Image (cartoon, rainbow, N blue to C red):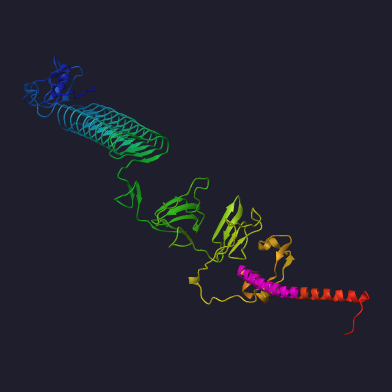
């Protein structure tokens, strides 16, 4: 026979047993067995079970007064089936190997079930346990409620550590404590807090308030965090509003005060501190990607692209989009090969690499060599400090708004040793103009076809400052001061013309005189030829 005592709010509920049990009168001899084989069963210091014909353990409690004039508490169990109730009041152990350790109105109603103590607790599944507390239920096989009040562990091996009104309602679900928490998913865990729910398989809410881990393998913590999808991690701060996941396998953090890694005083939404200087082989404050392959690493003043222990290419907006460096202020300087830029763009080149190259549709249109020489129009090594290639889109031409020569400084205040040019005409006349063709114009960035000009070696004999030599030994011609030479040569020529004009005028007058004299001679000759006699005097 199994008898059960279960609390229903007051101690008087224990009297539900009385209709089935007749209380025996006290005897002076203290006999332990039945006192009469005829008539009502009488048991010394025990309760008589008239329907079963046996004496049950019972003891006196002041609440019942003379009705229970026996020492001890009003406990019910059967020692013959290894049921144990060593003390307490109105406790019941009603199946084999069940135990109620003490307390009041506790019930252990299945095999191997245990109530250690407390009040009004119930264990009703095989191997289930309530450690104590008030009005707790352990109703799943192997389930446990360690203590607290109003807690329920209702599934196989489910457990509630304590707290108030917590529920562990699926296999191996756990609520550690707190109040009004529910672990209703298999292997789900709620550590504590208030009004939290772990619903998904192996979901976790470590604590907080009004958090929900609904997705399988999800995690929610803080205030009103909700992991609604599989594999999501949601951490919310004290903001009084739901912070929900929006998709599977997300890692979400709401922290108005910032997230600190290596610092307990974050100054931004994510503040990382305490790393090492980034280097090709490792280090940094942050790394994206595997160390065995391509990865991006940052420290507190450097970004480095790496590939398995060596440096790699760093790509920015490869698929499009603007890249903006600085904000136009004087402090927004960019250095390339230079960690101390002194200009908006400061490039420190070396002999092995060009300082700058600009390509359009894959074709080089501007190159700045390491020595500062600039080539325009193609990928070539300029022979001059500035050279336009014949392969340029407009055939190697260069224009200057308004025309004219390039300007240079010419203020008298900047000059000294000013002297007149002499022999300018002879100098220019000593030059020889020729036509020619380059042997390999493309190799030197020159135009093909017949050209007009000078030969450097010939010019060098007349005007050596017009000729210089390139590193490869080839001579270059730079015409300097040609305008001044031309002006003075023109002046000299004009002087010569003027002198010749004066000489010609004198000669013309003499010619006119000679022509007049010749006329007179011609007239005399005509008279002589006409027979005119001469009178002797």
The residue closer to the viewer here, 451 or 362, is 451
The residue closer to the viewer here, 406 or 190, is 406
The residue closer to the viewer here, 326 or 184, is 326
As for residue 170 lying within the magenta part, the answer is: no
Q: How many labels were placed on the picture?
A: 0
The residue range painted magenta reads: 482-509
Q: Is residue 137 left or right of residue 497?
A: left
- Displayed quadrant of residue 510: bottom right
Q: Position of residue 250 (x, y in %)?
A: 41, 39
- Kindly identify the residue that appears in the image at 33 percent across and 48 percent down: 268
Magenta-drawn stretch, dominant element (helix, strand or loop): helix
Q: On screen, 244 above or below 499?
A: above
Q: Position of residue 527 (x, y in %)?
A: 89, 75
Quadrant (top left/top right/bottom left/bottom right) for the N terminus? top left
Q: On screen, 399 above or below 246?
A: below
Q: Is residue 291 left or right of residue 242?
A: right
Q: Position of residue 41 (x, y in %)?
A: 14, 18
- Kindly identify the residue that appears in the image at 16 percent across and 29 percent down: 104
């Amino acid at each position: 026979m199994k008898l059960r005592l279960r609390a229903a709010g007051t101690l008087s509920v224990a009297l539900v047993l009385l209709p089935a049990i007749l209380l025996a009168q006290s005897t002076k001899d203290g006999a332990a067995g039945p006192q009469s084989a005829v008539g009502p069963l009488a048991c010394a210091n025990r309760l008589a079970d008239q329907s079963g014909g046996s004496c049950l353990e019972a003891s006196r409690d002041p609440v019942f007064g003379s009705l229970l004039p026996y020492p001890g508490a009003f406990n019910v169990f059967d020692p013959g089936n290894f049921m144990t109730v060593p003390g307490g009041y109105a406790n019941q152990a009603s199946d084999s190997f069940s135990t109620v350790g003490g307390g009041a109105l506790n019930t252990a109603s299945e095999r191997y079930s245990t109530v250690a103590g407390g009040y009004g607790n119930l264990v009703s599944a095989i191997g289930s346990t309530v450690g104590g507390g008030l009005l707790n239920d352990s109703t799943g096989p192997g389930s446990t409620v360690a203590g607290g009040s109003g807690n329920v562990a209702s599934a196989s091996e489910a457990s509630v550590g304590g707290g108030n009104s917590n529920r562990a309602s699926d296999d191996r679900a756990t609520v550690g404590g707190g109040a009004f928490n529910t672990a209703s998913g298999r292997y789900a865990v709620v550590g504590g807090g208030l009004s939290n729910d772990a619903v998904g398989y192996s979901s976790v809410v470590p604590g907080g308030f009004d958090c929900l881990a609904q997705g399988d393998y999800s995690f929610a913590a803080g205030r009103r965090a909700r992991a609604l999808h599989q594999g999501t991690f949601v951490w919310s701060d004290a903001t009084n509003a739901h912070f929900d996941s929006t998709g599977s396998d997300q890692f979400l953090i709401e922290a108005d005060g910032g997230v600190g890694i290596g610092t307990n005083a974050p100054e931004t939404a994510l503040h990382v501190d305490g790393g090492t200087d980034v280097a090709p082989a490792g280090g940094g404050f942050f790394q994206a990607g595997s160390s065995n392959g391509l990865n991006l690493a940052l420290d507190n003043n450097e970004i480095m692209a790496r590939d398995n222990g060596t440096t790699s290419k760093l790509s920015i907006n490869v698929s499009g989009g603007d890249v903006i460096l600085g904000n136009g202020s004087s402090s927004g300087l960019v250095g390339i090969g230079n960690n101390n830029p002194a200009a908006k763009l400061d490039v420190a080149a070396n002999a092995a690499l060009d300082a700058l190259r600009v390509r359009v549709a894959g074709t080089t249109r501007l190159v700045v060599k390491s020595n500062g020489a600039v080539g325009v129009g193609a990928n070539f090594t300029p022979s001059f400090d500035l050279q336009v290639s014949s392969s340029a889109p407009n055939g190697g031409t260069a224009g200057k708004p308004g025309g004219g020569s390039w300007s240079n400084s010419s203020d008298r205040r900047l000059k000294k040793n000013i002297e007149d040019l002499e022999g300018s005409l002879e100098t220019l006349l000593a030059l020889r103009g020729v036509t020619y063709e380059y042997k390999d114009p493309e190799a030197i960035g020159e135009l093909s076809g017949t050209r007009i000009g000078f030969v450097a070696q010939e010019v060098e004999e007349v005007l050596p400052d017009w000729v210089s030599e390139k590193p490869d030994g080839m001579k270059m011609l730079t015409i300097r001061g040609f305008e001044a030479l031309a002006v003075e040569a023109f002046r000299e020529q004009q002087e010569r013309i003027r002198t010749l004009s004066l000489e010609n005028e004198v000669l013309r007058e003499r010619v006119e005189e000679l022509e007049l004299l010749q006329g007179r001679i011609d007239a005399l000759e005509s008279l002589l030829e006409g027979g005119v006699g001469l009178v002797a005097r």
